[in-house]
Image (cartoon, rainbow, N blue to C red):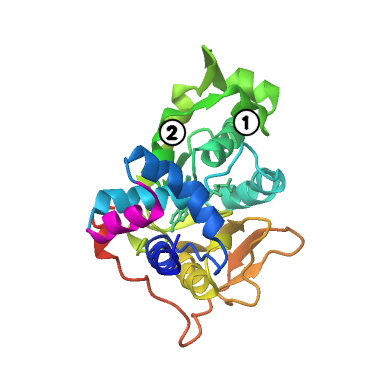
Amino acid sequence: MTPPDYEYLRKLLKDLSGLDLSADKQYLIESRLLPLSRNAGLSGIGELVQKMKGGSGDFTSQVVEAMTTNETFFFRDKIPFDHFRDSIMPEILRARASRRSIRIWCAAGSTGQEPYSLAMCLKEMGAAIAGWRIEIIATDLSQEVLEKSKAGIYSQFEVQRGLPIQMLVKYFKQTGEFWQINADMRAMIQHRQLNLLHDFSQLGVFDIIFCRNVLIYFDQDTKISIFNRLAKTMEADGFLVLGAAETVVGLTDVFKPFPEKRGLYRPTGARPAAGAAATAMPRIAAMAGR
Ligand SMILES: C[S@@+](CC[C@H](N)C(=O)[O-])C[C@H]1O[C@@H](n2cnc3c(N)ncnc32)[C@H](O)[C@@H]1O
């Protein structure tokens, strides 16, 4: 790959998905994009870049999707789901007792293991949530992972990663070599394609937001912009859950860590600091239709 082709891809990926590649990640681009270029009958990255410059928005979307990391598994890192069951939900149930409705957003839900883990936690709460209206909205940049999430079909390998066997038996049906999560669980999740770089205020206000293992790929300004906008789309007493390698500390004071609960944050009500990346980044024309 020539240096100009690398720079072109690096800038495009940053603008379209937030992915912030350092100057030495040529191997990552090659390992993710060479299969795509072969499938498209192209000779390599050079021709792939030419095709993108030719203005094929659909192909550009495929390139962006191929570069996203979709790694996920059921009950990933365990602790956030313990917090969800033992701290977040009891507090939200108390606080929302009169309205009996809760909105949860899984902001980079990938292939569904994270939103379905939350749905299983909720089902396990049984009578405590009977009669409550609980919405779970799972969003992701990638249409491909959303399709898989909607289908809720997982391989033996995928259900062996993090999912307790009792939950597998209780909530899934085996179909051949695969396992599909039951229809009532699938009905608990609404799926939407959404790029976190863009305005997401249309989703409404949430009580709980899981936004895990996606901000690590973004640069500091992008993280700050997203935190500031997440704070605006959250109830004052809501909860934000981040991934193990992510934090608001040192970036913004619109959220503060929840004492002694790693990965858990609450809105502070503070206004974003002047000059902070507070607004959504502009939509890029090449991604029209996303
Ligand atoms: C590593 S997975 C994390 C999945 C899940 N949250 C977890 O922790 O297991 C990151 C997900 O973020 C999505 N993603 C990447 N850039 C995004 C963006 N700009 N907006 C929304 N989702 C994005 C990817 O498509 C991918 O599915």
Q: Residues within 10 Å of mark 1 (few under 14, many from 20)?
A: few
Q: In the rendered view, does 281 fall on the left or right side of 273? A: left
> Magenta stretch: residue 48 in it?
yes
Q: Main secondary structure of the magenta part?
A: helix
The answer to whether residue 45 is magenta is yes
Between discs 2 and 1, the one toward the N terminus: 1
Residue at 59% x, 76% y: name it. 251
In this rendered view, identify the residue nearer to me: 114 or 189: 114
Choose between 28 and 121: the one closer to the eye.
28
- Say if residue 106 shows up in the picture: no
Q: Is residue 22 visible?
A: yes
Residue that numbered label 1 is attached to = 124
- The label on residue 47 is none
Highlighted range, magenta: 43-54
The answer to which quarter of the image holds residue 114 is top right
Nearer mark to the viewer, of 2 and 1? 2
Picture residue at 60% right of the left edge, 22% below the top: 156
Q: Amino acid at mark 1?
A: Glu
Q: Which residue is mark 2?
A: 148
